[in-house]
Amino acid sequence: MAKSFFAQFAMILIALVFLSRTGLATEKTADPCSLLTLAEIQAAIGNPVKAGTPKIHSNPLAGANCTYVVGDFGSFDVLVKPLQSGETPAAIKAQFAKMKMKPVDLPNVGDSSFFTSPGYGMTQLQTFKGSKYILFTLLVPGAKESDQQVAAAKLMRKLLTRI
């Protein structure tokens, strides 16, 4: 089961990296660890959260991540990257559909937003705003998918005011 989870997660990351390499933009991404406070994340998720660990990719087109530990073994990951040629909500939704993850639109958040559920209790929120693509990945042990979606939407609305 864990192997399958990591295989799916790896496929998602590979798809995102592939899509990020198809464009020519060189826009620098914001530090995702500076876009939300621990207090905001804890209030939305309802669990203790440890400080985020940044990961700046060697290819600036792949963006930057910030991973927070939620409770003892959960996680909240924020990826912010510049959109590349061909990266549209429709194209990214199609990639998720190929992986049997049905996107669910979240209206009135950014230019376009949608949820996906990779399984294993994980919830993702994809958001497009201007030239940015933001991906939240939440894994909050014991939380319902609907609760994670509410938390993700609340946090995304806050983050979007800061980029």
Image (cartoon, helix red, strand yellow):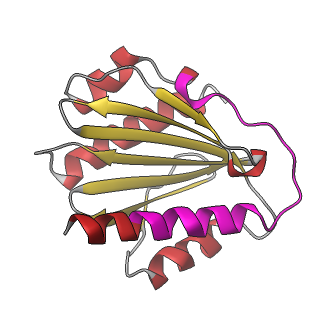
Percent of width and height locating residue 130: 74, 47
Left or right: 132 with respect to 153?
Answer: right
Is 27 within the magenta? Answer: yes
In the rendered view, tell whether residue 101 sits above or below residue 33.
below
The quarter of the picture where the N terminus appears is: bottom left
Percent of width and height locating residue 163: 67, 30
Q: Is 78 in front, or is 3?
A: 3
Percent of width and height locating residue 119: 26, 66
Looking at the image, which residue is at 84% across and 42% down?
A: 27
Q: Residue furthest left?
A: 142
In the rendered view, tell whether residue 35 sits above or below residue 56.
above
Looking at the image, which residue is at 57% across and 67% down?
A: 14
Looking at the image, which residue is at 69% across and 67% down?
A: 19
Magenta-tinted stretch:
9-33
Looking at the image, which residue is at 15% across and 45% down?
A: 143
Q: Is 116 in front, or is 63?
A: 63
- Res 71 → quadrant: top left
Percent of width and height locating residue 39: 34, 15
Number of marks drawn:
0
Left or right: 41 with respect to 23?
Answer: left
In the rendered view, tell whether residue 15 sits above or below residue 56.
below
Is 135 within the magenta? Answer: no
- Res 151 → quadrant: top left
